[in-house]
Amino acid sequence: MRCRSAFNAIYLLLAWLPLFVGCSTLVGHPPQAVRAPNIVVILADDLGSGDLADTTERSLIPTPNLARIAAEGLRFTDAHSPSAVCTPTRYGLLTGRYAWRTHMRQGVLGGRSPALIETTRPTLPSILAAAGYRTSGAGKWHLGLQSSGPTDYSKPLDPGPTSAGFERWWGIPASLDMAPYLYFEDARAVAQPTEKIQGSAQARKGGRGFWRGGAIAPGFRHEQVLPDTAARAVAEIERHHELQPAEPLFLYVALSAPHTPWMPAKRFQTVEGAGVYGQFVAHVDAVVGEILDALDRTGMTDDTLLLFTSDNGAHWTASDRQQFEHRANGNWRGQKADIHEGGHRVPLLVRWPDRIGSPRRGESNDTLIGLTDLLPTLVAAAGIEVPAGAAPDGISFLPTIVAGADGLRESIVHHSLDGMFAFRQGPWKWIEGLGSGGFTAPKRIQPSDGPSGQLYHLEDDPGELNNLATTHAEVAERLQRQLDQVRLREAP
Ligand SMILES: [Ca+2]
C-alpha cells in the first residue's frame, strides 16, 4: 500500500503540475506548493435556488454563509440536478451517469433498499482515492445498502458507502422521514434499530412536516441529525489537518436538510419571513458556516475547492407561496419532484481561492451545468484522467471555474419523480409529456387533440407558461430526436 501511495502521489504531482503552473500564472500567483486541492462538496437536501440571500429579490431568509461563498467564489445560475428527487441525483453526482440508465426508472429508494451504485463502477470518491486522496462522507446516503433487500442492519452494510469509494463514512441510511432511524459508520450500524417510533402528526403547512413510523435506534433524535452531521464534517476536517495534512482530502457532506421534517434548532426559531422552513434554511446556512470556519481554522481554505449545491429544488408548494412572499425556487415554475425548472434548477456555488482570482470572485455565470458534471470536473481539478468509461453523462466545467471559459455542455436531460423526461438545449426545453411529472397537480395529463408534450422558450418565458409545441413543432421534434439519441446511447 505504501508503494501504491507513493506512486499515486508522484502521478498526481506530475499530472497536476502543468495545470497548476499554467493557471496560477493566470491569477497572478507564483507556482508554489504543488499538490492537488482538497475538495469539499456540500449537498443540501431540497434547498431551492431562491433560498439563498441575494440570489433573488424575494429571498427572505438570511443566509450569510452561502453569501460568503458566492462572494469569494462563483455562482452558477443555470445548474441542474439530473433528477428532481434525491436518490437519482445522488447516483448521478457520485457516478457521472444518469440514474435512469439503471433499473430505477422513477421514484427514490427506501430505508431498506439494496445498493443502487454498481460495485464495479468508478465513482468520484473511488477515483480520487485511487489517486491518493483521503475520502470521507458524512450525512444522508440514500443510495441503498447491501446487495439485496431488505437491508439487514445487523450485518455489514456492504455494498454501501465504503464499497463506493469512501474510506470513512458516517451518517443516516436515507431521508430523515424514512425508517429505520439510525446512524451507521463505515459499514456498520452504530446501534441497532430495536425500538419503534410512531409517525409524527406534524402538519406540513405551517408546521414541521412529518416522519414515517418505524424502527429507530435507542436515543436517535431527528432534530439532532443536522447538528451531528455538522459536528462530524468539522471533526473530519480537523482530523485530516492533524493526521494527514500531506495528502489531499475529499469530503462529501450530504446534509439531510432542509428536507422535511423541518426541525430548526432553538436559536433559529426566531427567524421570520418563511415560517419554519425559513428557520431551518437559516440553520442549514449556519452549518455551512461551521464548515467554512473549520477550513479557516485549519488553514485549508485557500487550497480547498469547495462546492455547494442541492439535490433538487425546494419542496415549496402553491399554498406556501400563498402564505409567504418568499420564493424558495425563485420565480421558476413548480417545486421538488416536478419536471419544470423548480424541480431541478439548483443553487451551485464554487469557491477555490488558490485558483479563482480576486477579479473574478463574486461573479455569476450562466453556463449550463449538470450535477453529473461534478465527477469529471473535480477529477480534472485533482489532475487525474477520468478512467475510460466512467462518467458517461458528465462534462468537465473546470475551464469555466479556473478561467471563465464558456461551458462545453450544449444540452441536458431532466427527469422527474414519476419518470417524465425533458430535454434542454439553449433556450429551448422540450418536456416529453403533459403535467408536472412530480408533486404539483396535475401530475399527468393524457394528450387528446393537442400536443403530446410541452415546449418552452426559457429566455422569453422563464415561467414555462406558454406551450409552443404546436406553433414550433419542428423544434419539438428535433429535441425529441436528440433526447432519444441520448437515451439510446451506449452508456454502460
Ligand atoms: Ca432531496
Image (tube, rainbow, N blue to C red):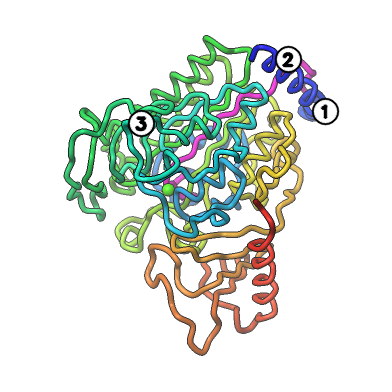
Nearest to the observer: residue 492 or residue 242: 492
Q: Amino acid at mark 2?
A: Ala
Circle 3 SS class: loop
Q: Would you say 319 lies left or right of 485 here?
A: left
The question of residue 169 being in magenta is answered with no
Q: Local crowd at mark 2 within 10 Å, few (<14), some, or many (≥20)?
A: few
* Quarter that holds the N terminus: top right
Quarter-of-image position of residue 389: top right
Place of residue 157 in the rendered image (x, y in percent of width and height, measured from the top left): 41, 33
Q: Which residue is mark 2?
A: 33
Q: Local crowd at mark 3 within 10 Å, few (<14), some, or many (≥20)?
A: few
* The residue carrying mark 1 has its beta carbon less than 8 Å from ligand 1: no
Place of residue 443 in the rendered image (x, y in percent of width and height, measured from the top left): 40, 70
Q: Local crowd at mark 1 within 10 Å, few (<14), some, or many (≥20)?
A: few
Q: State the residue at coordinates (46%, 59%).
A: 106
Find the distance from the CA under tag 2 to the CA under tag 1.
14 Å
The question of residue 50 being in magenta is answered with yes
Tag 3 or tag 2, which sits nearer the N-term?
A: 2
Q: Which residue is mark 3?
A: 155
Q: State the residue at coordinates (25%, 48%).
A: 212
Residue found at the very far bottom of the displayed protein = 449
Place of residue 412 in the rendered image (x, y in percent of width and height, measured from the top left): 64, 58
Nearest to the observer: residue 407 or residue 133: 133
Q: Amino acid at mark 1?
A: Gly
Q: Which residue is mark 1?
A: 22
Main SS of residues in magenta: loop
Q: Is residue 400 visible?
A: yes
Q: Which residues are magenta?
A: 28-52
